[in-house]
Amino acid sequence: MNDRLSSLPLVKANRRTFLSHSLALGASLAGIGTLLQSCGGGNANSNGAIKWSTWAGAKTSKRLQEFTDRYNRDHNANVKFAPIPSYDDYLPKILTQLNGGIAPDVFYAADEHIIKLIQNKTIEELTPLLAKSDSVVKESDYFPGMWGAARTRSGKIYGIPVDCNPIVLWYNKKVLQEAGITEMPAELYKQGKWTRDVFQQMIDKITANKKRGYILASDSMLYHYSWAINNGGRIYDKDGYGDFIADQDAKTVEAFEWLAENVRAKKFAYASSLPSNQSEDLMFTANQVGFLSAGRYYLSTFKGARAKGLDYDIVPMPGTDGKSRPTGIFLAYIVLNKKTKNPTEAYKFLSNYVSKDGETLRLKDAGDAVPSVKGADQVVLDGNDPVHAQHLLDARNTGFATFASEMGTPGLSLDIVSAFDPVFLKGADVKTTLGKVAAMVNPRIKQAQSLLQ
Amino acid sequence: MRLQLDVSAMKASVHRNRWRRTLSEAFWGGFFLLPQLIGLVTFSLIPLVIVLWLSLVHWDGLGEVQFVGLQNFIDQLSDPNLRIAFVNTTIYTLITVPGGILLALLVALGLNKVRGKTIYRIIYFMPVVTSSVATGVIWLWLLNSDAGFINVLLRSWFNIEGPAWLIDAHWVIPSISIVSIWSSLGSNMVIFLAGLQNIPSTYIEAARIDGANRFQLFWKVTLPLLSPTLFFITVLSIISSFQVFDQTFVMTQGGPDKASYTIVYHIYNLSFRQFTFGPASASAMILFAVLLVLTLIQFAFQKRWVNYDL
Amino acid sequence: MLQEAVKTSKPVFQARRPRQKQRSIAGSMLAALIHVLLIIGAIIMAGPFIWMAVTSLKEDSQAFQDPLSLLPNPIVWQNYPASLQAMPFGQAYWNSFYIAIVVVACELITTAMAGYAFARIRFPGRNIVFVLFLATMMIPFQLTIIPRFLIMQRLGWLDNHLALIVPAALFDAFGVFLMRQFILGIPKELEEAAIIDGANRWQIFWHVILPLLKPPMAALGIFTFLGQWNSFFVPLIMLSSPDLYTVPLLLNQFREQYTSQWALMMAGSMIAVLPVLLVYVLGQRQIIQGIALTGLKS
């Protein structure tokens, strides 16, 4: 029997056993090490530290990091800034982090993001916090048109606008003058003569001079809506919380048809048909186009081009009667993570960020937006660039944020833009397309609304 | 009498032993199986149940769950994005599978006849072990329409202006096909090679004696004997082709303008970018159903052409 | 007559030794032609790697303007330290490495155990459970990845390496299948001797079976190691903090952030790919045999 034993690999197995034992030991040590490492990593926020995030390229990141450092110094705080470089990636990353329990305490939400966050109840309702006596900011500190999708129909506020970009018309003085235009739009506006017909005349002159009159942007419907509203039309009913009714409103249809006609006649350029290396701001600085609709975000680019001879100013969008109507405003909000471990610190930073002082600090010098809070206007008027910067403030005071219905339905905005491509790229009929859009949009709105509590 | 007592006692003890044995086997079976069993249940069976349930709800993992029944399936089946994804994936499969298999077969046939198999094998197999991300990055550079090696070569040697491989909607799927074929040629080739080498040389010799020329040899002897391997590779290739993701993610992000938007990219988009798990799960189940049907069809047809006579 | 030959002859497998080719001119010309084609093919297969290596040593401008030149001029070794500085490759390497090792170690043991159970232990329900294992191999992973994400979320393992290690270590139907097949082929006498000596199942497994499992363990081990190292989709979904990233994930982020800096990107890719290629060249026989095995077993 002993012979049997020795013939078995049991004896040889001693060395093998040793090897396999040590392998098992090594593996289990590594495994235990992993467990320890993973268990120990969750307590980052226990010392009053908070993390905040936004989408930001390198330049903006730098500025916001300086803001954060200054806040930490002034308030003896421990705030960490962790930007997400790409805007397209932003919401997926935030949602992933929320799922993983590692989301920032305070973060930005664009107008198209915020409804999703309200729906899945991951952000805190700010109305009670704003009402508290020791809050640095109050609901009334912000202009009424700023809230948009951040405020539900019942008045609950979930995000505070960090700043905004109201749409105005920027015009290239040189291009206009070379086309034989003597009175600049801003002057005409002061005299109450700035109408769409006058605008059309200028466009015609510019086109006759072989330049483009105006570039119709294709990254948002807000521009089109602004034209329609300035024409006296409506887009959504129930103050933006209801259905898409643009196809039934004669003035809106007329406005869209006017846009389409000009694009067809090549007096307007449709942004997505421009070659990729000729974006609208490049065309503007190269004196190839007369008018652009934009917020304040091109200011630093245009300002920098003054050295090369660029001269520009702004004017509100032309209305039917010489007085402008509300135009669209691009907005972003800052929100509070419901599961933050330091709610007091987090709200303190948030409210400070959007206070008068906070916004002024962020927007001065190379500021690329307009303050959303009252009392910080000086930052836009300082430096007198553009000369009629007041128009930006006026547009903000009377303007409107993107409609809650549209923002509340994921992906809807971009789908509507795509739905209009045939009109502007291939000359499809406006009325039919508006009808198709309504047919596409309204069921989706209803479905999204049914998910909103 | 003592004998009778012994017999029943023996029977009883045999029964007890058998029962003890079964118990012991069950214990040991469970013991040895436990880790993998836990894995199976937790990471395969339970997820299957969950995905079934997920396809019937609206949920983003964070908020509330809303039951919607079959609405997700209805929505997805009429979703133009899913349709685009299906068309793209089918075209991709139609290019990649026949092309890849043909090339792999040709290489294996050639390799079977020459010396130096090992060196060739090592080289042809290198792309297989390389990470799909690295492959994507390298080919992103090679296929760059302005400064990529391929277009520059075409320009300077042949004076042809090469297509915008990854930016032109008509060329993007063929481009991704090329990358996929390049990546997987080695492993298909190796399997074919093994299949070829398993064909007994006596059959070949017998056919030669009968006066078969090279062509007849291939069609009547080699191919039929290779058909099981061919079948195996075809089934697996079609399945994996329908699941293409890494290349579309690394090289084109589904673009340009959804020209390379594939089914798995659609599922990924719905689940981990838009966080709509309901529709995503419905799409995944639709994909599974399609794969199942395709595989069953192939299995049904195999009697026609696959030769198991060995 | 061919049919008769098929039926009557008992094939003797000498497939590894091709008989001497007749040295006809046509024959050697054909061989030469095949070689030429194979070499062209080999250039296409290996070319991209060579290109990656060459480009990684160029300056960005040269990479862009002069992609055809084979020699970098000047040779910019600096791209490598720059890559390492731009992204925490060292950390990613460690992550990929230890995850792969832990997974392989655990998985080899657990699949061997399961394979042994299926091959040798007659427990109730054995066949059903085995068929269950096999059936799961047909489920596309896209079907289970969403629930797995949610399970990890509930467990709190999102953005944690456990989400990558535990499923891979505990569940590998293919490995179980492989082990079972192999163990079935081990002669029972070896175990019977140990049983007579009074060893219990665990001792039999540990001392008798396990040492004999070197071949499938080697193949499975290398397979799994490579698979874990190159794994992309699962880490993409489970991890969000860059310092937890594995090498493919980091390379992807590299691509997103440095899109137009080709030379740098090629250096980064080289860093990601070189160790794998080295392991491959050293262990290629095992790997290729393993792949061939899967093809023949079916």
Image: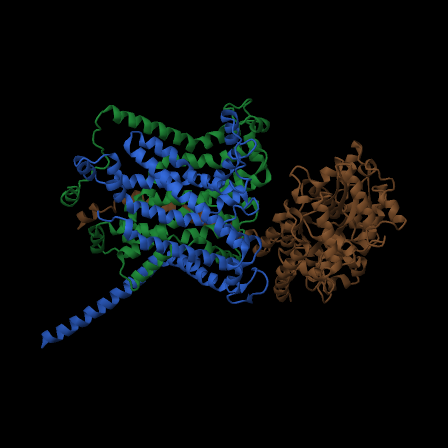
Chain colours: A brown, B blue, C green
Q: A436 or B195: which is nearer to us?
A: A436
Query: Does residue C211 show up?
Result: no
* Viewer-side residue, C172 vs C233: C233
Q: Residue at x 49, y 26 (%)?
A: B158
Residue A84 located left or right of residue A300: left
Left or right of A196? Residue B295 is left
Label tally: 0
Residue A118 is situated, as x and y percent measured from the top left of the image, at 65, 61
Residue drawn at the location 41% of the way across and 36% of the way down = B126
Regarding residue C197, the answer to whether it shows in the image is: yes
Q: Residue furthest right?
A: A191
Is C227 in front, or is A449?
Answer: A449
Residue A184's quadrant in the figure? top right
User: Residue B37: x percent and y percent?
Assistant: 38, 58
Left or right placement of residue B66 versus residue A254 in this view: left
**Percent position (x, y) of residue A245?**
70, 62
Residue B162 lies, with reference to residue A380, above or below; the image says above
Q: Residue at x 72, y 53 (%)?
A: A256
Residue C212 image offset from top left, x and y in percent: 27, 46
The C terminus of chain A, quarter of image: bottom right
